[in-house]
Structure formats: C-alpha cells, structure tokens
Image (cartoon, grey):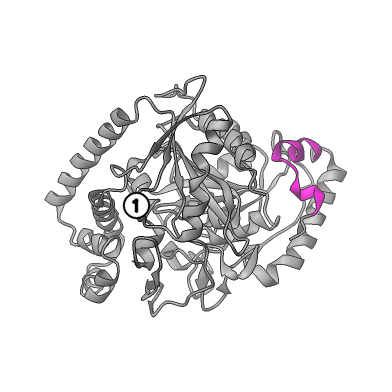
Amino acid sequence: MTVPASLARPLREITTEIAHDDRRVALYADLAAHRDRQEPTLRAFEARREVCPDLAAAPLNGLPITVKDQIAVAGWPRGFGLERPPRHRDAASAAVVARLQALGAVVTGKTALPPNALDFQTYNRRRGFTGNPHDPQVTAGGSSGGGAAAVASGMSLLDVGADLAGSLRLPAGWCGVSSLTPTEGALSGDGMLQGSQSLDHFARIGFIAQRARDLSFVWSLLQPRSTPIHAMQDAPRIAVWAPEGHPFCDADTHAAWTSVPTQLSQAGLGVDPDPMTWLLAPDMYRLAGEIIGYETGALIPAPIRWLMRRDHGAARRSPGFVAHIHDGYRRDRARYAQNLDLLQMVRSQALARCGHMDALILPVTGICAFRHIKPMRDRSGVRDYDQQFATLAGPLPYFDALTRFTLPLTLLGWPVVTIPLGRDRNGIPIGAQIVGKPHTEPALLGLAETLACVFDAD
C-alpha cells in the first residue's frame, strides 16, 4: 500500500503548504489519481468530487476531507448505505461539517457505510464489501468502514464519521489508523440522522485520521470554549486492561496485550494493571442496549419494531447485544426513566472509581479482523449472523463479540482515541482504545501521541 508523499504528511504541514495555489492544485491531482488506483479494489466511497477550489480560506486552506454518507453535506445526496442510490440532496451541512467548511475544508467524497449504520462490516449488495487496505479480502469494519479504509489507504486525509457502539473505533482499529470519539455532547449531532431525528444519548460525530497528532490538530480548531471538568496530571497514570484467566478475546489479541504494561512502564508512565471487571460487567451491556433500543425504537414504525422483537432467534443468537436492543424496543417509559437514573449513577461511580487515573487503555475489540462474512439473513439492512468467534473464554456471537470492549465505553460517554497497538499473525492491525475523563480531549490526544510512539505499530 503505497501512498504518495504529498498525501502522507501530517495535516498541519499539508494545510500550510496548500495555502499556495499551485501546491493545492497538485495535491488535488495526486488525490484524484490515487483514488482512481485504489477505489476499484477497496470500494470505500459512495460519491467523489475532486475539483480543486480556486479560492481557499484559512486555516485549512482547501484541505480535502471526506464525510460518512449518513452525515449531511450541503449539495450532496445522502444514502445512509441503502441499496437504492440516493436522489435528494441536502440543503445544509451538519453543524460539525459546516464548521470545518468555514475553517476552509472542502468535502471531496462521501464514504461508505452499511445500511443505516447497522452492522460492523461495511457492505451492501449494490456496492459490495469495503475492503481493508491491508488485505481487501478482510473487513474494514463498520459502520464507518468506508472512512477508515479511505484514510488508511491515503484516499482521504480526514473523515468525519459517527460512533454509537463502536462505529468509528472498530474500523479505525482494524485499518490501523486513529479515531476520536469526543465526549458525549461536546460536538453537535445535528445532521447525523434523517430530517430532524435525533438521539438523546450515545451517538456522537467524530473523526478518523492517519495519526493522533492529526486529530489533535483538527480538535484544536474545533475545540469548544469550555473549561475542562477534569485535567490530567503532569505524569499521567493509566489503568491498563490486564486479562485474567480466560478472557473474551482471541489468542492474537491476548498476545498483543501481554506486553503492554511493560512497554508503558519502560516509557516512564504510571501503570495500574486492571481486569476492568467493573467496566465489563453484564449490566453495563444491558443498560446500554436498552437505552439504545428505546431511543432508536422511536425512529422505527411500531409495526416494524414489533416484527423485529418477534424475531426471537436473533435475540437468542446475540444475548449480550441484540436481546437488550429488542427489550428497549418495547418503549416502556417507566423502564427508560429508571435506566436513565441508573445511567447517571453508573457515570458518577465510574468517575469516583477512576479518580486517581488519567486514562484507561483497553482493546478496541477482542477479535482480530476477519474475512468478509455475509449475514444469514438481511431484511432491508437489519441483519442477523450465526457467526461465532473463537475466544479464550469460548465461542462468542458476532454482535456480542464485536461490542465487548466498545459498548461499556459508549455507556460512559467519555472521550475515546484509538491508535494502532500491533498486528495479528496475518499482518492486520490491532487497535487500542485510550479513554479519558469528560472534556479532556486535548490532553487525551497528547497522551495518544505519546502512546503511539511507544507502540510504534507501523
């Protein structure tokens, strides 16, 4: 995977250079040519435009970016990954996209996702599977798989995506790039769903870039004007996931994590090995799933919701994820209110428990990236899989395995940066999640830059 030098440099350098018109024109030409070579194999895009702007506004100076095709961009159709190509063009950009455009960014592509962002592989029958740049026969992940594949292959310099249960984190981890899922509520979620639809919790717009330092640069331009609730210590102390016994991860992931505490200690960081059983407790998955089900259920017509709940096989095949989503589809207001009270208690307890810690670090997923898998059933993008993944604790169903390490962090609503940790036996990246306390994005991104140098996973 060879990326032209003009596309492989840090974003800060690129934005400075393309203030010159001739260099901006050259960059766009390199980008278009590189996409022409890579896209037929990877299928990362729903739409492309590579017209270099005649005028460019600072500080981004015409920086070409891409946007996940569930997020609105003025003048572009938005297809949500559905089988039918979109026809309607959005009249206005999502608030985050509009802010980047005001800073001088130019949208040059809409990146692929599974239908309605409801899968952890990026696939539909119209477009086919989005391939991992490290091996196109292997999944790029989902639902922001198009963005991760585009960034990892050099077809995008920055992708604006979204995360609910790992949609930014899983693809970034498997494609070997970095992602930022900001603190819940730190950025507007406007323009992420159809029309005026919204979710009150968990769904967050975020970013994928080659490196943590690129995300740090972008965040410094977007950073809300607020005082951080928490600040990191001068010498950060990190709780590191330390598997005990037979954990829910495969052998390659387990092997990659055995050396992490030593690596961090040798780099002079304070390390507390922790199995994080409190974070990975069963009730965390139940609580997150029921809240997600209740809130997304409001966007689904009641008869369709009823039919989905009647699919008892799907719930049996995914007791740790789909079953809880279906419970939320009941739309029981009293239960939802109780869950919101419990959510606030869980978040308060987590802050108290981690009071002496600056960050947590744990796997993005316990499962290494796999060859493309077709669902056993696909009803307008609502998919069911009979796939079970082998872990050291025994077989784990598809959705339960892929949300094992992401869903509890979704519940907390804390900021998460992913970076490459290493590679599996097939040479496909393995990712790490670095988790900070609310509104510590600048310090968390700085820590991620340090850890990326420690792991040096390239």
Q: Which residue is pictured at 79% across the width and 46% down the height?
A: 54
Q: Is residue 282 left or right of residue 173?
A: left
- Residue highlighted by disc 1: 245
Quarter of the N terminus within the rendering: bottom right
| Left or right for 32, reference 245 | right
Above/below status of 306 relative to 230: below
Q: Nearer the viewer, residue 165 or 20?
A: 165
* Residue 360 sits inside the magenta stretch: no
User: Residue 341, position in %: x, y?
Assistant: 18, 40
Element assignment for label 1: loop
Residue density around tag 1, few if under 14, some if 14–19, many if 20 or more, within 10 Å? few
Image x and y of residue 154, in percent = 71, 55
Quick check: 98 left or right of 376? Answer: right
Farthest top residue? 234
117 vs 188, nearest the viewer = 117
> Magenta segment: does it hold 10?
yes
Task: Tell me where residue 287 appears, x and y as whole percent.
Answer: 24, 50
**Where is 167 relative to 441, above or below?**
below
Magenta residues?
Answer: 4-17
Q: Nearer the viewer, residue 106 or 201?
A: 201
The answer to whether residue 232 shows anywhere in this view is yes
Residue that lies at the very extreme toward the right in this rendered image: 22
User: Magenta part mainly helix, strand or loop?
Assistant: helix
Q: Residue at x 24, y 71 (%)?
A: 316
Residue furthest to the left: 334
Image x and y of residue 68, in percent? 54, 56
Q: Quadrant of residue 353?
A: top left
* Amino acid identity at mark 1: Gly
> Residue at image x 75%, y 43%?
9
Q: Is residue 325 left or right of residue 94?
A: left
Can residue 102 be seen from the camera position used here?
Answer: no
